[in-house]
């Protein structure tokens, strides 16, 4: 599927609208995790990755117009309707009425908040890494509503439901994805910090 915008242009656009390390890291994380799942399902790695990278493009500058502003930014930047639909659908029921229909959209809906939860759980470990994380420990963090309270458990549960997966499988599949791409995310973040001089 055509994105209308290549990786380089998408990266430039992300930096134009986002300055905070936290937001850049989230964008890269969702990009890499989506790329992993696309490959796993034999789907379009480029499309899934670019959608992941740009899904929160408007959030830092326009939190009150999240998903709506993204539509305008992406349109102006030459993104295809497919890409815009994908991005806007991740906020279904929260900031958009666009339902996730494609497997890619359902996956992004399910893993967006969940990658945040797994990332926060990894930081609590002595290793500061997801590599030695077990299903049992992420299940515990998922149930502990006070932990990373900003990561909506209801959205994650709904994501599992629309994917037709049970919650434990979704948790574990996403931990496996994060294990696979953790190094890539670190490399990208190092490159980003060098670029911006925030080493
Ligand atoms: Fe997000």
Image: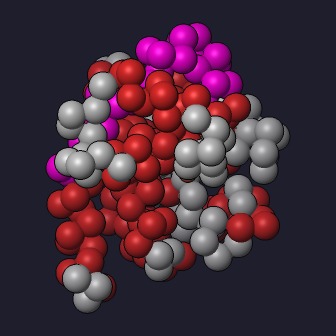
For the point 20% across and 48% down, the residue is 127
Q: Is residue 154 visible?
A: yes
x, y percent for residue 30: 42, 47
> Which stretch appears magenta?
156-184
x, y percent for residue 37: 36, 29
For the point 36% across and 49% down, the residue is 124
For the point 44% across and 56% down, the residue is 26
Depth check: give the residue in front, 84 or 30: 30
Depth check: give the residue in front, 24 or 80: 24
Q: Is 158 colored magenta in this rendering?
A: yes
x, y percent for residue 79: 54, 56
Depth check: give the residue in front, 145 or 62: 145
Looking at the image, is 186 positioned above or below residue 32? below
Looking at the image, is 163 positioned above or below residue 144? above
Looking at the image, is 136 positioned above or below residue 178? above
- The prevailing secondary structure element of the residues shown in magenta is helix
């Amino acid at each position: 599927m055509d994105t209308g915008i290549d990786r380089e242009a998408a990266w430039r656009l992300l930096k134009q609208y986002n300055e905070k390390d936290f937001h850049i890291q989230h964008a890269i994380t969702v990009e890499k995790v989506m790329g992993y799942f696309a490959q796993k399902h034999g789907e379009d790695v480029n499309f899934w990755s670019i959608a992941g990278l740009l899904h929160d493009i408007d959030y830092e500058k326009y939190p009150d117009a999240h998903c709506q502003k993204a539509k305008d930014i992406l349109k102006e930047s030459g993104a295809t309707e497919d890409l815009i639909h994908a991005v806007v659908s991740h906020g279904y029921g929260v900031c958009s009425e666009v339902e996730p229909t494609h497997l890619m959209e359902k996956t992004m809906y399910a893993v967006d908040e969940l990658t945040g939860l797994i990332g926060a759980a990894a930081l609590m470990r002595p290793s500061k890494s997801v590599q030695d994380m077990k299903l049992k420990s992420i299940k515990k963090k998922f149930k502990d509503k006070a932990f990373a309270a900003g990561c909506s458990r209801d959205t994650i549960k709904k994501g599992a439901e629309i994917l037709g997966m049970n919650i434990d499988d979704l948790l574990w599949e996403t931990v496996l994805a994060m294990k696979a791409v953790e190094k890539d995310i670190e490399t990208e973040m190092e490159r980003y910090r060098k670029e911006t001089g925030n080493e």
